Amino acid sequence: MRRKSANDIRSLKGKIPIVCLTAYTAPIARVIDEKVDLMLVGDSLGMVLYDYENTLQVTLGQMINHAKSVVGASSKSCVVVDMPFGTYEESTDKAFMNSARVMKETNCNGVKLEGGQKMAKTIKYLTKSSIPVMGHIGLQPQSVLLDGGYKVRGKVKSEWQKYIDDAIAVQEAGAFAVVLEGMAEPLAAEITSILNIPTIGIGASAKCDGQILVTEDILGLSNVAPKFVKKYINLDDVIKTAVHKFSDEVKNRSFPSSDHIYNMRPHIVSNKGNN
Ligand code: KIV
């Protein structure tokens, strides 16, 4: 089966719910590839892997390195790479140069960038230049310092029009899908019904066309979990149990046992010279 493209993701609108997860590394990409439609190399890797306070410190080099390993370890899902803060806002030229670098160096299927109406010109430029773009509106983590935190959008109806206009602007600019982050359910439902491209929700209810979560969050490997995260397993505990066992066995010298060591070749008796 060939890898899904951005167009394949777009064509799922109204057909089946679209399954998306983040992937930052080869081992995770290898395991989840079978079951997801789209893997996002999200700049959330700054907080999840590097323990940064927010996503603003993430560099293009980091995104490219992680994306290379995710693309290399997967073959089925569409891989989208987040453009990190400071690499696309200044001008359409800068956005193109950096996005084209991501596409060339990682062989991914598209890029994602944050922003609605204010990024529409850039999204249009990129898509016209053959770079598939996924939009991201609602709560935008790269604007956290100005927005004063991670606040849910659309809780009052007077806020709605701005987000609806953002969604339409992103679609009209040519995006193949749009992430709705941190949005009250009725607003997410309204945007999903207006758009003809898929909406991918994170903290935006089951009314979206698809869902995305941070893989480490659903596996129980993150120390903070927002309300919208469902932990499907507590891998923290699984890992701790395995590491305790390893530590005990190293200390009592039961590891490595005969199954895990190398012996010399059996001695070959030579008859030469015995006659
Ligand atoms: O960086 C990220 O992981 C995201 C989310 C949509 C999951 O942008």
Image (cartoon, grey):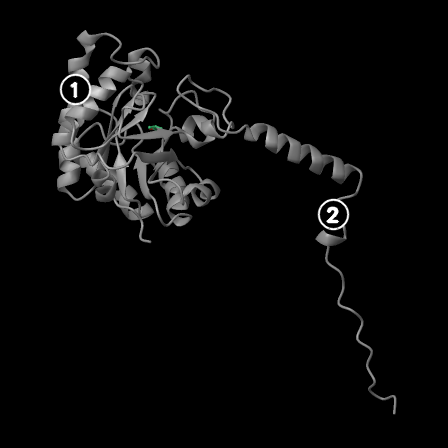
Quadrant of the frame with the N terminus: bottom left
Label 1 element class? helix
Quadrant of the frame with the C terminus: bottom right
On screen, residue 273 versus residue 167, left or right, reads right
On screen, residue 243 versus residue 204, left or right, reads right
Residue corresponding to mark 1? 164
Above or below — where is 270 with respect to 97? Answer: below
Residue at the location (44% across, 32% down)? 215
Q: Residue furthest front?
A: 15
Q: Distance from label 2 to label 1 (Cα)?
A: 61 Å
Residue 191, numbered circle: none
On screen, residue 64 versus residue 169, left or right, reads right
The amino acid type found where label 2 is placed reads Pro
The amino acid type found where label 1 is placed reads Ile
Residue at the location (71% across, 52% down)? 260
Label 2 element class? loop
Count of picture labels: 2
Quarter holding residue 272: bottom right
Q: Residue furthest bottom?
A: 275
The percent coordinates of residue 154 (x first, y second) are 24, 12
Please name whichever residue, 57 or 135, is drawn nearer the observer in this view of the structure. Answer: 135
Residue at the location (19% across, 13% down)? 160
Along the polypeptide, which appears first: circle 2 or circle 1?
Answer: 1
Taking the image as four quarters, which one is ligand 1 found in?
Answer: top left
Residue at the location (74% across, 47% down)? 256
Quarter holding residue 32: top left
Residue corresponding to mark 2? 256
Q: Residues within 10 Å of mark 2 (few under 14, many from 20)?
A: few
